[in-house]
Amino acid sequence: MNRRNFIKTVAAAAPYVITTAALGNAHTAAASDRINVGFIGTGIRGGDGLIRNFLQQDDCQCVAVCDTFRDRREKRAKQINDFYAGKSGSATYKGVAMIADFRDLLRRADIDAVCIATPDHWHVPILVAAARAGKDVYVEKPLGPSIQQDFLARSVIHQTKRVFQYGTQQRDASHVRLGCELVRSGRIGKIKEIEVIAPTGTPGGSTASMPVPEGLDYEMWQGPAVERPYNDDRCLRPGHYHIYDYSIGYLGGWGAHPLDVLDWGLPTPMVPVEYEGTGLIPAEGLYNTVMNWEVRGKYENGMTLTFKTGPDSTKFVGADGWIMISRRDIKSEPASLIAGFGPPSRFAAMETGHARNFLDAIRKQAEPSSPIDSAVRSDLISHLSNIAVRTGRKIKWDPVNEKIVGDKEASKMMDRPSRPPWDIA
């Protein structure tokens, strides 16, 4: 018997043991109808972003926080407890579990879904474990630090049939939905080229070894990544975004945003089959992911892609004009391409927000606004661009067999070894 059915049965048999809070009220769903969510990785994005958003959903109960930093666990538990105390009008509320090891959180039968906002190298291992434990998953971008990990994530989500939501929250924005709707509807005519721009990374970072801070489980923080001496610049934001041990840098970490718009706007989902380009890899300091890149890609149908650094945007150029979508607005040439058009109908389901859309998908066991296949396609462009820059060669991609063609060295870069005992398959 699952948790919801159990509570409903108890309520019917012995209503006097069920509290008012459990039964719900005009603003809060009954406990039997709430979706219990745990949060794994509770730094700035996981706490100030995800926890805050999920607390606003009346049919959601935030029940557990997990982080390798003890002070973060304590801070986020207090954040949630204080919110529920204020909402119920009680003096205190202490219903949130603080958990150091994500595996302990996943063993809890009362948790329906998890939000994963860890450093990038932990996204897929925790996603896989969560889905196999029967949890629906919300995963922050980028998806994984290698192509093979992305493919594994996709395979496990399809096999387990768990709901997956990718943290590309810009799909909630009305101007992004409108721009993608117009492109997909043929408003600019046949698409000839696409230009995707994302901010560059940063050099620097100290390489000096430092004592591990009190309250941090550094062994768990490193997890499947290669073992390294502790350093504040390694573990604290924004360090791990720019260290190749854990990510491919802003190629994926920020590129995920405009590349997601690219994937969403294409009438037919596809990725380029050729990649070549240049970039800067810092030779000094701790940060060593690709910066200042400019990658040129080509699709099977002849359409071209330019992926480079600069102000975040996605520009679709067609036979009849262009539409450019940024994080804040949408522009077109001619202006008549977007003038006079109201809210798009095709993507209306996204208007409720990413957290709400995820919870609705769980209830319906339906595909949410940012599904796994789209996440893998956009992340794949980042990874193949990274490989092209690092090898200095043209990379040819076989989209049917999903492999790099004719380059053994580049093919090896599709995967990363995981440090035992964190191998996943």
Image (spheres, rainbow, N blue to C red):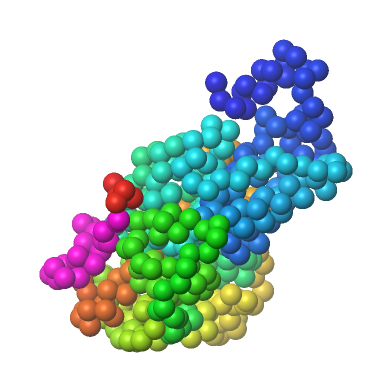
Residue in the image at 32% along x and 63% along y: 226
Residue in the image at 83% along x and 38% along y: 26
Give the image location of residue 56, x and y in percent.
Answer: 72, 51
Q: Could you tell me which quadrant the N terminus lies in?
A: top right
Magenta stretch mostly in which secondary structure?
Answer: loop
Asked if one can make out residue 370 in the rendered structure from this viewpoint, the answer is no
Side of 304 where 238 appears, left or right:
right
Quadrant in the rendering for residue 401: bottom left
Give the image location of residue 69, x and y in percent.
Answer: 55, 57
Quadrant in the rendering for residue 411: bottom left
Q: Which residues are magenta?
A: 400-419
Q: Quick check: is 404 in the magenta stretch?
A: yes
Relative depth, front residue between 84 and 175? 84
Give the image location of residue 165, x and y in percent.
Answer: 51, 52
Give the image location of residue 172, x and y in percent.
Answer: 61, 61
Side of 83 where 241 appears, left or right:
left
